[in-house]
Image (tube, rainbow, N blue to C red):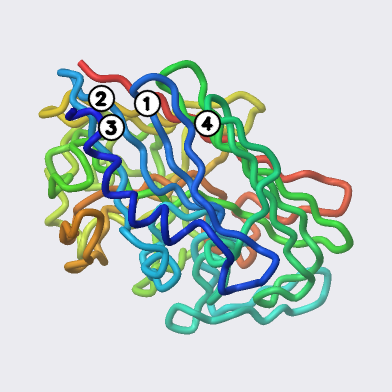
Amino acid sequence: MAKVMPQTCYLVLLVLLVGKSVYGADQEIGTYELKRGDFSVRITNFGATVLSVILPDKNGKLDDVVLGFETLDEYKNDSTYFGALVGRVANRIGEAHFSLDGVQYNLSANDHGNTLHGGAKGFSDVIWTVQSHKPDSHLTLTYNSYDGEQGFPGNLSVMVTYLLIGTNKLALKMEAKPLNKATPVNLASHTYWNLGGQNSGSIMSHTIQLLASKITPVNDQLIPTGQIVPVQGTPYDFLQPREIGSEINQLPGGYDINYVLDNTGSAHLKKAAVVKDGKSGRKMELWTNKPGLQFYTSNMLHNVKGKGGFIYKEHAAIALETQGFPDSVNHPNFPSQIVNPGETYEHVMVYRFTAN
């Protein structure tokens, strides 16, 4: 009986999600499950959003390990980006503009004069088309972004596949193809993780290892300065595993910074992070082909009502968003995010879960 309890809170959500969308008469919003054994993932095509990830702990007890809401309306009005696929350009663009090929593009300024996660209505707030779904295998979603959407240039064809590998791996493959103009692309998955369970409280005692020896420091608006500096001797150093809360009080609010991952730049996936919750025994490894990783400790969560009525507070979860560097369009020394017609943007993430 305990193994089905974590899914009961989705009955209300499922009823509300299935049916015609208020955003378009021809578009339907639904929930889609991927499941192998005790490992299951639920996703909606609204924002290509991860609704739940249910995993056993070291004793076989199942829990949902991602934060989220009960109803579709809450996802529509969400400012936390719970579980969302964000773009066209994830993270921040300073002063909501950039220049490309001699043209200045003015973007949607939705974060104190800057652009955050694609603008006021980015990819997390649109309905994606279901291209393919096999419950024991994968879900593929597509979206066609139009020229000028949120200020970005060119038509862009976007696809994301959520894929189960074996009985303990979840992979995301994000692709984007510019159709007529060069454009920046930086897609990211904004899932909030708490390996003790979404209703277990703080993640301060989780241990984390980040395989990154440098960060891109930011100003008071979280816009990168353009510098790339080492983490050694600072609270940002997680090259060796340690508790998230061990030095967090030395930072204003907590962690919200882009890490420069080591050993990236090849076609092969590289390990980016390892997270473990000692109480449940759950461990999550994250692998990627991207050069950056945003480490965020839910500093801006303040009494948000989540699944089952649980109240999420500050530091209730972590987000680990593999990505290109924030504001790369305005920093020539950062890896470029510009993708030209005829080229394909590819972003891969693989999560591996164990418990012992």
Instruction: Give the alpha-carbon distance from disc 1 to disc 2, as whole Å.
Output: 7 Å
- Classify mark 3: helix, strand or loop: strand
What kind of residue is marked 4?
Ala
Task: Say which of 287 and 240 sits in front.
Answer: 287
Disc assigned to residue 275: 3
Q: Residue drawn 31% across and 45% down?
A: 66
Where the C terminus falls, by quadrant?
A: top left
Query: 10 Å neighbourhood of mark 3: few (<14), some, or many (≥20)?
Result: many
Task: Say which of 102 and 42 sits in front.
Answer: 42
Say if residue 328 shows up in the picture: no
Name the residue tied to disc 2.
56
Q: Residue drawn 24% across and 47% down?
A: 234
Query: 10 Å neighbourhood of mark 4: few (<14), some, or many (≥20)?
Result: some
160 vs 145: above or below? above
Where in the figure is residue 186, as x and y percent of width and height? 61, 54
Check if mark 1's residue and mark 2's residue have beta carbons within 8 Å.
yes
Give the number of the mark in front: 4 or 3.
4
Left or right: 23 with respect to 74?
right
Instruction: Give the alpha-carbon distance from disc 3 to disc 1, as whole Å.
Output: 18 Å
Disc assigned to residue 171: 4
Instruction: Give the alpha-carbon distance from disc 4 to disc 2, as whole Å.
Output: 18 Å
Left or right: 249 with respect to 341?
left
- Classify mark 4: helix, strand or loop: strand
Q: Earlier in the sequence, mark 4 or mark 3?
A: 4
What kind of residue is marked 2?
Pro
Give the number of the mark in front: 3 or 1.
1
Name the residue tied to disc 1.
39
Check if mark 3's residue and mark 1's residue have beta carbons within 8 Å.
no
Task: Say which of 124 and 152 sits in front.
Answer: 124
Q: Earlier in the sequence, mark 1 or mark 2?
A: 1
Check if mark 2's residue and mark 3's residue have beta carbons within 8 Å.
no
Check if mark 4's residue and mark 2's residue have beta carbons within 8 Å.
no
